[in-house]
Amino acid sequence: MNTLVLALPVIALLVVLYLAMVLGWRARKKRQAGFAAAAVTPEDAGALLLEAPMLYVATTPANKPLERLVLPGLAFRGRGTFIVWEKGVTLSINGEPDVYVPYGNIRSIGTSTFTIDRVVESGGLVRLDWTTPLVGDEKARTVAATAGATRREKQVILAAAAAGDRPSNADIESYVRILDQADSVRVLSTVQSHLPSRHPGNPTDTPKQEGQVA
């Protein structure tokens, strides 16, 4: 009896913490409802070029590696396959709908050392920088566009929306750990070779690399 009495506060605390996590996750998902649903890999994606086993880690707003996004198909960490097609790439995570990104939506591909909940050796993560459309009404799109933004960045976005320049897409980054080093090199080189050059000769087109691929 005494043991049960002592255990009750601990159980109550665990229940409260669990409920807080659930409510926090739901609130985050609601705030990010403006992000588009996962795109199914089209039949005309072209020839299959490469499949690489991976550990999917997270997707974040661009340049905000510590702010997780809960996009459909990309909300949870998990094992899967990084698939490279002739016209785009597919992030296929076990138990989740596939997410297809055409090359026209990919800004660059590079390497990183850390993101939310994950720190690895130098260059141990492959980072896919891409743009996703925003959906829903104006409020949902604006709220999604400000995910992870600083106060100043939010002010700029809100001022632009008030002036009629309403957000229609968002720049984001997906982080994966390719399980084999040779596959990492092939993924980086193959995807990079298929990306359109938006500004020929502009060094900003070169993907950010943090250390050597490992």
Image (cartoon, rainbow, N blue to C red):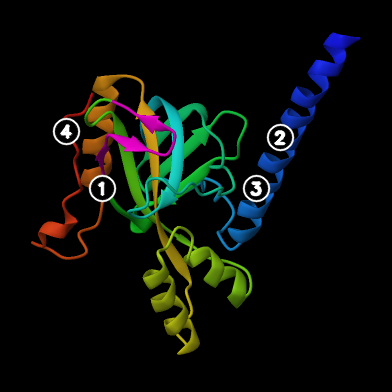
Amino acid at dot 4: Gly
Task: Give the CA separation, mark 1 to mark 4.
Answer: 23 Å
Residue 200, percent from left and from top? 12, 63
User: In the rendered image, which residue does mark 3 sit on?
Assistant: 24
Q: Amino acid at mark 3?
A: Gly
Q: Earlier in the sequence, mark 2 or mark 3?
A: 2
Q: Are marks 2 and 3 in contact (CB under 8 Å)?
A: no
Residue 97 — which label? none
Instruction: Name the residue tied to disc 2.
Output: 18
Q: Is residue 13 left or right of residue 207?
A: right
Please say if 68 is above or below 31: above
**Mark 1 packing: few (<14 Cα in 10 Å), some, or many (20+)?**
some
Placement of the N terminus among the 4 image quadrants: top right
The picture places residue 35, in percent across and down from the top left corner, at 55, 59
Q: Nearer the viewer, residue 16 or 46?
A: 16
Magenta stretch in the rendered image: 110-120
Circle number at residue 194: 1
Q: Is residue 112 magenta?
A: yes
Q: Earlier in the sequence, mark 1 or mark 4?
A: 1
Q: Is residue 199 magenta?
A: no
